[in-house]
Amino acid sequence: MSDWKPVIGLEIHAELLTKSKMFSSCPVVDSVTAAPNTAVDPVTLGLPGTLPVINKEAIEMAMMVGLALNCAIPPFNQFARKSYFYPDLPKGYQISQYEHPLCVDGYLDIDLEDGSTKRIRVRRAHLEEDTGKSMHMDGGYSLIDYNRAGVPLLEIVTEPDINSADEAEAFARKLRAILQYLGVNDGDMSKGVMRVEPNISVMHKDDTGFRTRTEVKNLNSIRSVHRAILYEVERQIKAWEKDEGVRRATFGWDEAKQKTVLQRYKEAADEYRYFPEPDLPIVEISPEWVEAVRARLPELPNAKQERFMNDLGLSRYDAGVLVADGPVAHYYEAALAAGANPKSVANWLISNLFGLMNRDNVDRQDIESIKLTPEKLASLVKLVDDSVINKQTAVEVLAESWETGDDPAQIVETKGLAQISDAGAIQPLIAEVLAAEDKMVQDYLGGKDKLFGALMGKVMKALEGKGNPQVVRETLTQMLDDMRG
């Protein structure tokens, strides 16, 4: 394996959150929950005599993505017809961009595990219309839902600068976060609104050029992207080492079997017979238009990470985790707005709340829909920081609030979980423990200092875990010192 290096380029398709479709006023609906074929019109269906009209909102959303990816926006843009025949493509061609895409020559820097960064070049990002959706039914027939047909789709194409599944995952995650921050895509890959297609080949240490690549189509989770690349890289290396070679082909990903599945071989380069779309005008983009769109860009993940570090005192790692998913960053900032300490709430969010989410298989993209709202997490953090409850109790309260959605402060009050911080109230219980554990006390006084932890544990148990650890420690230390005389 050390003699081989993966060479990976990504094609990422992202539906844009416009109100209407790319070339008509037909509304965009949720293609998963909406009744089939309820958001269609003559333009969507490609009926004779219909004419497309360019959606300006889609153009500007795509420009925002391009600017966030450090792309140039050429002044001359043109749509083209991409001809191919498939049941979910009602016109028999797709309106896309070819020679004159909207965004070119960009890049995105990704963070690597060793703390360094790597620049992945973005070749282009171009607009097109999405296809319909084929549903293959039991009984050997298929149904077509055209609700998705015509939805604005931005295709982002990287250069083959990615050299591992980890790097591909880092790129996909960061791009998804950028799309969410911009408000142009919600990042819900399970619904197909963002789809990743890696082009994968391997290069031997003695190679001077690229070998044959394969493509894995329509991956709908970042986990699948990672696993598909790992599998395909290993498959190709084995094929080359056995002198079987690799044929240019398109694969799907079988999640159940955790393997790529051949869909078709590519005997030659695809011939889509591109030509300029005769029913659409040239799109001329002035520098003033570009700057007007640039002025609308929100704070993006890199800038937010730096602000969290510089203004809130977070570590680079914690800040990076919090900005990696748009919904998580929004959740964190809502907790701050509710009055939580920045470092404390970051620790509870990353260490404890993420643990509950992982346990119950709740994706971080769905954090804003959980019962434990940012305000309730802030309430819990303030109870700990104000020494109302200790950390052990807080973990239990967090778990209950996670399940029920009840406010942590109310849980603490109802169950009487507030910790005891009054040394005067703690002293009698400590005295009882010391009397009951006389031998341990005498051994401690005789020089066995390690027994302090055991005595501390006995006292905390007597206090039913509600003792303020700092006050208990200080009081116990003073009482033992007094016994020494």
Image (cartoon, rainbow, N blue to C red):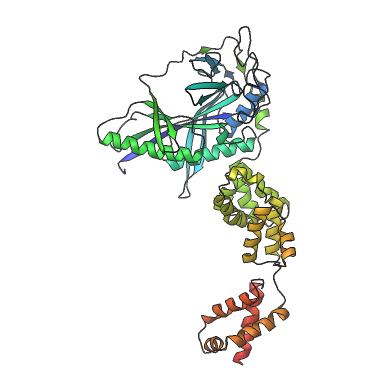
Quarter of the image with the C terminus is: bottom right
Numbered-mark total: 0
Q: Is residue 473 above or below residue 71?
A: below
Residue 77, position in %: x, y? 57, 18
Camera-side residue of 288 and 454: 454
Q: Is residue 444 above or below residue 89?
A: below
* Residue 167 x %, y %: 45, 41
Whether residue 45 is situated above or below residue 449 in the rendered picture: above
Q: Quadrant of residue 302?
A: top right
Residue 471 x/y as whole percent: 66, 75
Residue lying at the far top of the rendered structure:
49
Q: Is residue 55 left or right of residue 138?
A: right
Q: Is residue 237 left or right of residue 12?
A: left
- Which residue ends up furthest to the bottom in the rendered image? 485
Q: Nearer the viewer, residue 360 or 96?
A: 360
- The answer to which of 439 and 319 lies nearer the viewer is 439
Outermost residue on the front side: it is 139
**Residue lying at 38% horizontally and 38% vertically, measured from the top left:** 231
Q: Is 201 displayed left or right of 23 in the figure?
A: left
Q: Position of residue 285 (x, y in %)?
A: 62, 21
The quadrant of the picture occupied by the N terminus is top left
Residue 341 in view in this figure:
yes
Residue 480 seen in this snapshot = no
Q: Is residue 318 above or below residue 299?
A: below
Residue in the image at 54% along x and 40% along y: 174
Residue at the location (71% across, 63% down)?
A: 412
